[in-house]
Amino acid sequence: MVSESHTFLPSEPDRAVAKDSSRALVEFAGRVSASANGPALSLSVGGKNILLPASLLDFLISLLTETAKGNAVTLVPINAELTTQQAADFLNVSRPYLIKLIEEGKIQHRKVGTHRRVLFGHLQAYKQAEAARSAAAMDELAKQAQELKMGY
């Protein structure tokens, strides 16, 4: 079981393999029902077949796509505790702004001595809520622009 985050920075050969693998999985995913129950993918490793759940297919495609682009990919367990600097980096905000969000109760945290720790799952929830709020605001602006016949 993974208990800490792991970062993978792909080499050029890794990128090429990831690109081919991503394309193959996208093609495969197009033929597999999204609601498939049970294993949807079988990998052969060292002569042994490994079955992967259908629910991991989209995750693997995303992982391989980012790898193919040469982006570093980090796997962080949902229950991982991050420092305030790590949390700020994840949200792409300053550490003082993150502290403000914590103090306003917008992001849950716990104290370890004098240090704050934030669960990755709480950051994900905050980020998703903010994305939804932003999308709703953009929809409202577009609606107003259409009502005012601004050409949108």
Image (spheres, grey):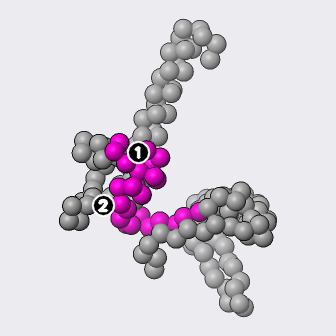
Residue sitting at x 47%, y 40%: 131
Is residue 141 visible to the viewer in this orientation of the structure? yes
Disc 2 marks a residue whose amino acid type is Arg
In the image, residue 44 above or below residue 5: below
Query: Which quadrant of the view contains residue 20?
Result: bottom right
Label 2 neighbour load within 10 Å: few <14, some 14-19, many 20+: some
Residue sitting at x 21%, y 61%: 114
CA–CA distance between discs 1 and 2?
16 Å
Residue sitting at x 54%, y 8%: 148
Which one is in front, 85 or 75? Answer: 85
In the image, residue 118 lies at what x, y percent? 33, 58
Which one is in front, 151 or 42? Answer: 151
Question: Which residue corresponds to mark 1?
Answer: 94
Asked if residue 34 lies in the magenta stretch, the reply is no
Question: Which residue corresponds to mark 2?
Answer: 117
In the image, residue 84 lies at what x, y percent? 35, 55
Mark 1 and mark 2 in contact? Answer it, CB < 8 Å. no
Magenta residues? 73-97
Query: Which quadrant of the view contains residue 77?
Result: bottom left
